Amino acid sequence: MARALLSADWYRVAPLKPRLRGHVEVHRQLFRGDIWFILQDLHSGKYHRITPAANYILALMNGRRTMHEIWEAACLRFDDDPPTQSETIRLMSQLHSSDLIASDLPPDMEEIGRRHSKQERQSMIARIKNPMALRLPLLDPDRFLGATVSLVRWLFTPFGFVLWLGLIGAGLVLLGLNWDVLTNGFTDQVLAAENLVLIALAYPIVKALHELGHGYATKVWGGEVHEIGLMFLVFIPVPYVDASASAAFDNKWRRAVVGGAGIMVELALASAALIFWLNAEPGLLRAFAFNVMLIGGISTLLFNGNPLLRFDGYFVFSDLIEIPNLGQRSNKYVFYLIRRYLFGVKDADSPVTAKGERLWLFTYSIAAFIYRLFISFAIALFVASKFFFIGILLACWALFNTFVQPTLKGIRYLFSSPELRQRRGRALGLVGLVLVGVFSFLFTMPAPYTTVAHGVVWLDQDATLRAGTDGFVAQVAPDVDIGQPVVALADPILENRVEILESRLREAQLRLRSVLLTDQVQAQLLRDRVALLEDQLEGLQKRRADLAVTARTPGQVIVPDAGDLDGRLVRQGEVVGYVIGSDDMRLRVAIPQAQAEIVRSRTAGVEVMFQDAIGVPVPARLIAEVPQSQNTIPSRALSTEAGGDIVLNPAGITDLSTLQSVFQFEVATVEPMQISHVGARALVKFDHGFEPIGYRIYRGARQLFLRQFRV
Amino acid sequence: MSDVGYPNRRIRLPRIVNYAEAPERTETELDRAWAWVQGAFVSQGARWRALKLRPILWAIWRYKRRYAKMTDVELKAAVRPLRIKLRRKRRGNHLPVWAAGEAFALIREVSVRTLGKRHYNVQVLGAWAMMKGQIAEMRTGEGKTLCATLAVAAIALSGRQVHVMTVNDYLAERDAEETAPIYDFLGLTRAVVLEGQDGPTRQAAYLQEIVYATNKEIAFDYLRDRAILRRAPGNLQRKVDKLVPGGGPTEELRLQGLPFAIIDEADSVLIDEARTPLIISGAGALEGSIPEYVYHAAMDAAKSMTSGVHYKIPRGIKRVEILDAGFDYLEDLTEDCEDSFGIPVIRDHSVLQALNALHIFNLGDAYIVKDDKVQIVDENTGRTMPDRTWSDGLHQMVELKEGLEMSQTNETLSRMTYQRFFRRYTQIGGMTGTAQDAAWELWSVYRLAVVKIPTNKRYIRKTDTDRVFRTADAKWKAITKRVKALNKKGQPVLIGTRSITASQEASKRLTAAGLEHQVLSADQDADEAAIVAQAGQPGQIMVATNMAGRGTDIKLGEGVAKMGGLAVILSERHDSRRVDRQLEGRCGRQGEPGRFEAWLSLEDDLMTGPDAARLRRVAYGVSFLGSRATGRFIRARQRRTEAAHAQMRRDLMRQDRALGDTMAFSGQLE
């Protein structure tokens, strides 16, 4: 686009003799190798980034030179790329609307009033637009911070930093060493009622120290801190401090430290608390330390440290990559890309001001959008599950802000923007095409639809081989036919007793024979004795026969720990192995209620992948379903504790109680399973054929709402 | 019945107004959207609003007899108490219908005695509509000049200055002249502001109670005042300025402000002329313009560029677009260039202007060369505008292209849109023959509602169906034949053309056919009006652009009425249907017979150009279906052009608003 050097509106600007107002300070900074100047407005606490040419023009404004003289001087000074008159006008306009320049004319009362009320309205709208982050300024901490800053100055030195690193390092090492102890029963401890009180106590203290961190960091390097207040994030009060003075620091590391000071303080507190917690006796203080650790560690990492949300992490991040105003400009950049390349608007202004910004801006915009979407819905759902009505309102508001409003803006842009005038047909066509594409992708393009769940290989009672009697394992022979002993047990005492009984029996039989003809009374006694002994012997022999554990049903026999059995004492009734018939080996699959319906009604095919052979799908089929939902799972292997996906309820009736109700399905492989798989875990994939993704999203959303709101 | 006399009640003194001006309207986006929606309804209520005007007729009837009985002396004496009464009854811009009726009755009586003309009821209705700040749509020939006198005099009597705006100097002078006796009788002072008058004359003129002038003259004088005042409009600012030492105006102001405007041909003034802003410029007021060699270098570079490779001319916009390859080419070209032409900002822009001069602005179409000077041709009227120049170096480029001496660059000194100007008026009333088509826009931009005033006599003009030809040649042949036939009967013919070139073409054809005729260019003076006035004589053939002799009453000659009255032949549709209808209004005035025929071709200006290409092809395709079918395409094209122009006006306003926002720091709006 050819820019015109001269502007037809210049006549309105040319004779003005503006001067920079007294409350403006200029700072020089480097961004990605380019020089920029930062205007600091001491009244409003706002900062404006301007180019060297703009700064030159600004510097010449002394109330005696006319704008025309100034512009000409600037053209001479920057003769290879002179500022155009339109650009100069725009600069003046921005300076004026920020109240940074005064003109030689008497002030226009009406205009000032109009501007003021406009600003008021805008800040009001900004508040209404974001009801989840209301700000309430409380006091001016500058004097307090000024008086006490000398106490902490030593912390903001290389020495202080090394000290901090040491503390954090120690904390991390201890955390690693005591991970199990800490995570054990984590949820129990956190959500217990008395602990909530402790959190409520620890929270303001930790956060206050956090804010002091920002404040002191700003103060140490000469900034001023004039506002401290409360912000209501999702109705939870969070203190905040206005550390924007750091924007004037010319060293980006210092700016980053100011932004990150809060996180640094919290991490240090968390480390210290961990050390205390590990060494202290159980008690209230120790519990308190635990909570400090919790707040300092987790909340910091999840919220404050996350650059995708506009908290501390964001500012540190944008300082470090030297892209100020990252969030805003990244959105602008994406819009610019659409305008420039999709709609072909040639003279679209790119917000990119330096090399290497493109990729950052692009990725940041997308990532932040998705994350913001996720977080706002998560918050809305959370609130809605507690206060239904407010939550729904918030959700609607979030929906409006993230989707409806940009969509409306987009529609307005498409239909009424003058820059699309010659290209409106193309733009509308393209947008229509994209919409149709997305829509047809979502609702007509069939996509494979599957449910994946964990299963465990499971056997029926009668397919189990149990020892019929006590005995030591003498021999294991798993590969035998029906009727052959699988495990031979040895019981030496039993043998002896059989031998003794046999001897006695022989003795009794001999004695019987000897008196048979002489003494009928004695003979009758001995005859009874023989019968008794024979009976006893029969019992013992049966036991001896039981020593050989045989497979009673046809099928394959497996003895899971065949190798270790030799010489071991096996008690009566103990499982030594399994006999598996062709269709006996089945997988028990636990499926959460939400997916049960689709598995039940729309399973076209089943595939199984065993734990030891991930990547090798084995065809399978759905055999049966336990008709009603249950609150238990068949095996611990399916629980999250063992790597499954069903969450166990620690307060449940049995060990295997679950939090949500589950349905159990039985799945068998088409080819008989290998014996080694008994008791093994497997991933089971239920194939529901093909379905466009859109319907699934709809179903998922519906279930989410049904579950969350129980309507 | 004797409330005539000096009232001894307390007289409410009017508020002191330093400079009557409506303050800048603060509108939000929502207000504008609402006005847009409202406009849809308001534009439909034109007839209904006319019904609501009826009470003025009862009011006037009530006072009619009282004034009719008076002698001239008594009548003159009655003016003074009426003035006081009107002032007392007036609340801001609102005058009660009974008070207005009394004034109207008096003025009508004066008119009868001085001019011998009695206002018809429809004229009373029209005047009342204007006083209420509406646009009165009255059929042409209903006597708008006389109608205006009622409103103008009544407003002046109620103590407000009136600006009566016409479209050209001739009409301003003529109207002032014709109506003078009424105002003189009433003791109202009046003046005419004309082009070429000097400052003090104008200043004196603007002190009078009634000021006749063209909209341009008043607008430029106002703009000049604004340049002195330099601050936001409105009385508060005036008063504040008076308190600040040195804050008041540094020079004498010309106007007394913008109190009440009665606009003749309101649609043409408020809509058609509002497409370009008013600009006062002066040569080289500021240094720092671009050196001459840059123009030469840019022109050379532009000539060496290829269309389609280095630049393209997009459809629909009159502007060259340089392509990326073009920018690269220029960069290579000026690689070793050390002077100003090597600066990308200056180079690219000046080459762009050179390309525009070479490919968009064509000799004879956009401008003509006269006395070694480039003179811009007005798109609307086809007239040359000797005092106008293009800005941004374009004018110099065109001069360079024509091999003329380059003039000095003009710097803008003050600029304002017509929309802004008219919205500054405390109140506006207007009259026109063709307002209904623009009713929506009149409401959404100016908050002016249109009232459709019924005609005095039944109207018996005949309108033929359009005749459409494939080629211009066929069209002209047919027109010539038609004119010959009409002429044979002795029926007068007026051929309306779109441009001077078309007039010349028509003249050539008529001469070839041996038809005696007169050609009018749009000079817009008394001679022209006199010639146009003769158009109704038997056997007359006249060729005129649509603007020629506007506002002139064409009286029919003897026996002409029997032959069917004046036949108006439209030889080409204009960009807007309203202009066509204005031409239509040349015949069949005041219940006289008349005939209107449109003879069009697919090669008319409206149908040429890249924008219309597709439509024209389709029209060719269906031309075997006859005139009715192809005529629709021409009307469709006209509608599209109307929409494009409306869009241009909206853009202008949008830009103006945006500019107002950015320029807030300069503390001035123009």
Image: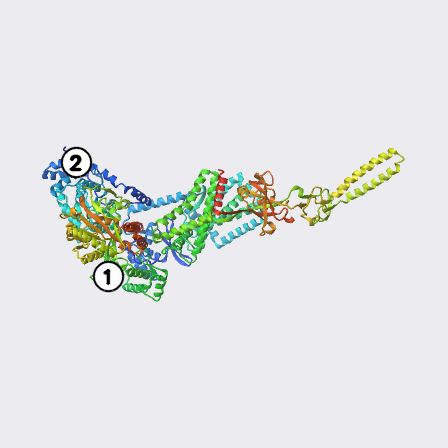
Find the distance from the CA under tag 2 to the CA under tag 1: 63 Å
The three-letter code of the residue at mark 2 reads: Trp
* Image quadrant where one finds the N terminus of chain A: bottom left
Q: Colour scheme in the image?
A: rainbow
Secondary structure state at the residue bearing disc 1: loop
N-terminal of the two: label 2 or label 1? 2
Viewer-side label of 2, 1: 2
- Tag of residue B407: 1
Q: Are marks 2 and 1 in contact (CB under 8 Å)?
A: no
Rendered position, B123 above or below A30: above
Question: Which of these two is toward me, B239 or B608?
Answer: B608
The three-letter code of the residue at mark 1 reads: Ser
Chain at numbered mark 1: B
Q: Does residue B419 appear anywhere in the picture?
A: yes
Rendered position, B205 above or below B91: below
- Tag of residue B53: none
| Residue B437 pos. (x, y %) | 26, 46
Q: Residues within 10 Å of mark 1 (few under 14, many from 20)?
A: some
Question: Which of these two is toward me, A472 or A544?
Answer: A544
